[in-house]
Image (tube, rainbow, N blue to C red):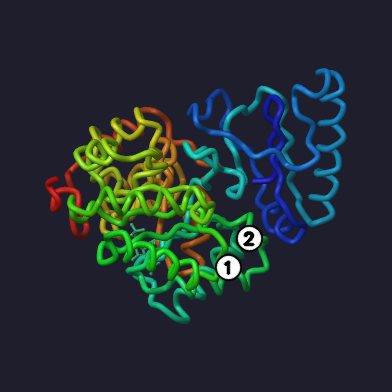
Amino acid sequence: RLLMIRHYNLFSLRGAGHCGRVFRKVFCATPEGQAPPRHPRWMGVEPQNTPQPSSASTGLLEAAYQRITAAWVSSAQQLGCMDVHVLGEGDVDTEVLDPAHAVLKLNSGHTIPVVGLGVYLCEPGAQAYEAVLSALRLGYRHIDTAQVYGNESDVGRAVRDSGIPRKDIFVTSKLSIRNWGKSRAQAAIDESLKKLGLDYIDLFLLHAPGSLDTRAETWAVLESYHRQGKLRSIGVSNFGVVHLEKLAQTAQVTPAVNQIELHPFLQWPRLVQYCQSKDIIVEAYSPLAKGQKLDDPTVKQLAQKLNVTPAQLLIRWGIQKGFVSLPKSTVPARQEVNLNVFSITIPDDDMATLDGLEADFVTGWDPIRDAPV
Ligand code: A2P
């Protein structure tokens, strides 16, 4: 997980403490002769001080990269890394191995880390606080909460106590459908900001389609907070195509995301295709089907074949589809496993096998079908 070089980008980790942990897990990302998946939306954040391709001639860049690479290798060795693979230009050219730098670009211009910790069903208080703190220590930089989870204040406290700069953490919350309508929505967003203890929320969603009567007016409130900079990006959750089409009739801002239950057993192909055609990032909640499909024979067999866990296989499937994935776990060891998906490649034929598992399997409520308009 240490180091990769692609044509012009070097991806590193911020902070020496963090480096020590990751450097000890170095291995080559791509089996020989096998190209990693290419998704046009993959991008990396340039580490500071890395020269931009346009700012120097190729020769100068090459020299700069060799210097930086040598410095990284030596610091990795000092940190106890026994096995450093330096991948040459062209060996690997797409994958980002550092979760903090694995991001997608939203239509708002901001970036979103592709794996986030879902804190749905994390009990308010110590459990939610500990879960978020441990995730941040493990390298997560994206936490997904909601007003109805009742744990926004615990999320905010953990974010502050982590000591990680605010700008490096991506926080999502969602407006409960109890707070639909202009004045209620305004009060509820103010309350979320207060509970989280943040000046701005990175991404704020309508939690479900709710009532058509007040949906447009409620979305307009999100737009106004977005214009003020208090909600950096805004989006929706549990919206079907019909809801997105209706919203588009009045919206001034296109939702940046649509967060839906999504895994190989529930794929929403038409909805996903619609979102992607409108530049709306699809976020997968319950990517593990709430743990109910980890024993599925096909999942188990493929996981074994690829030498990964069933949970990693399901998360990675979503990432290779271009989704943001939001696995929930309160157990640090599982959180670590769930984040460690950036060196996995599911080959095309195995992706096709997973695609074949569609079963319209909804693990909880089905707000998309529950709200017909
Ligand atoms: P726990 O919080 O005890 O780890 P989803 O993200 O699809 O909603 O799934 C969440 C469920 O899956 C929770 O019950 C969670 O339990 C469990 N879970 C999360 N990660 C793993 C994992 N790596 N292996 C097994 N179960 C997991």
Whole-angstrom CA distance, mark 2 to mark 1, is 8 Å
Residue named by callout 1:
159
- Nearer-the-camera pick, 248 or 50: 248
Q: Is mark 2 within 8 Å of ligand 1?
A: no
Residue 175 x/y as whole percent: 34, 61
Q: Quadrant of residue 280?
A: top left
Look at 30% across and 38% down and name the residue there: 354
Disc 1 residue crowd, few under 14, some 14–19, many 20+, Cα 10 Å: many
Task: Point out which mark residue 2 bears.
Answer: none
Which element type, helix, strand or loop, lies under badge 1? helix
Label 2 crowd bin: few (<14), some (14–19), many (20+), radius 10 Å: some
**Residue at the farthest bottom position:** 126
Q: Look at the numbered disc 2 and give the secondary structure of its residue.
A: helix
Labels 2 and 1: the sequence-earlier one: 1
Q: Is residue 227 left or right of residue 2?
A: left
Residue with the mark numbered 2: 166
Three-letter amino acid code of the residue under disc 1: Val
Do the residues bearing badges 2 and 1 touch, measured as CB atoms within 8 Å?
Answer: yes
Q: Nearer the viewer, residue 330 or 277?
A: 277
Q: Nearer the viewer, residue 240 or 57?
A: 240
Residue at 67% in and 54% down: 22
In this rendering, position of residue 108 left or right of residue 52: left
Q: Is residue 251 left or right of residue 2?
A: left
Q: Amino acid at mark 2?
A: Arg
Q: Residue at x 82, y 24 (%)?
A: 62
Residue 106 visible here:
yes
- Taking the image in four quarters, ligand 1 sits in the one at bottom left
Determine whether 323 is above or below 229 in the image: above
